[in-house]
Amino acid sequence: MVNLHDGKEFDFIADLEDANKRENELFDILNSKKIELKTEMREWVKTGNIFIEMECYGKPSGVMASQSYFWVHELRNPKTNTPVVYMMFPIKIIRGIANLHKNTRYISGIGENGGASGVLVSVSELFNYWTKLVDWDE
């Protein structure tokens, strides 16, 4: 046990065992579950927003039609190409958009041939909302 500056004790072996367990769980997810990846390359850095597609040519698409176990949103630093990756259940994204509706903007007529529509959401507000969820197991 190591005594930390705040008086709490830290058990390195227990923490290492827990970390190994979680790494194995992540490995299993990445190798056995369907994952949908969306990558933001440039504009999110300038605007602080990401676009989440919800419909294309009048039919559910993007997060609304996803059959994935996890939705993965990758934010890339355009200068260094360094990724920051967030994984979330698709339903949590939909709930986040619904709860942040005052801070989102609906956009249509974008994407290939202008058929896509969805919401523009503040990255910081959406991820802040997700991290405050109490029930992560829904």
Image: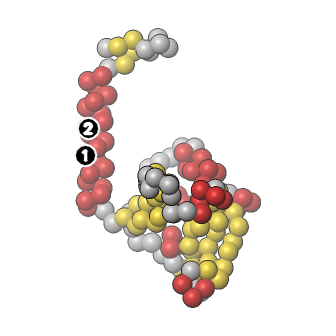
Q: Position of residue 46 (x, y in %)?
A: 64, 58
**Nearest the eye: 76 or 55:** 76
Instruction: Tell me whether the residue at label 2 lies in contact with that at label 1, contact meaning CB atoms closer than 8 angstroms.
Output: yes
**How far across and down, in percent of the image, does residue 56 sit?**
56, 83
Q: Is residue 91 visible?
A: no
Seen from the viewer's position, the closer of residues 87 and 123 is: 123
- Percent x, y of residue 10: 37, 19
Q: Is residue 107 visible?
A: yes
Left or right of 32 on screen, residue 113: right
- Quadrant in the picture for residue 14: top left
Which residue is labeled 2 in the image? 20
Say what amino acid the circle numbered 2 marks.
Answer: Asn
Q: CA distance from mark 2 to mark 1?
A: 6 Å
Question: Dot 2: within a 10 Å radius of its alpha carbon, few (fewer than 14), some, or many (20 or more) residues?
Answer: few
Q: Secondary structure at mark 2?
A: helix
Q: Label 1 belongs to which residue?
A: 24
- Which residue: 31% across, 50% down? 26
Task: Name the residue rendered at 40%, 71% in the picture.
Answer: 67
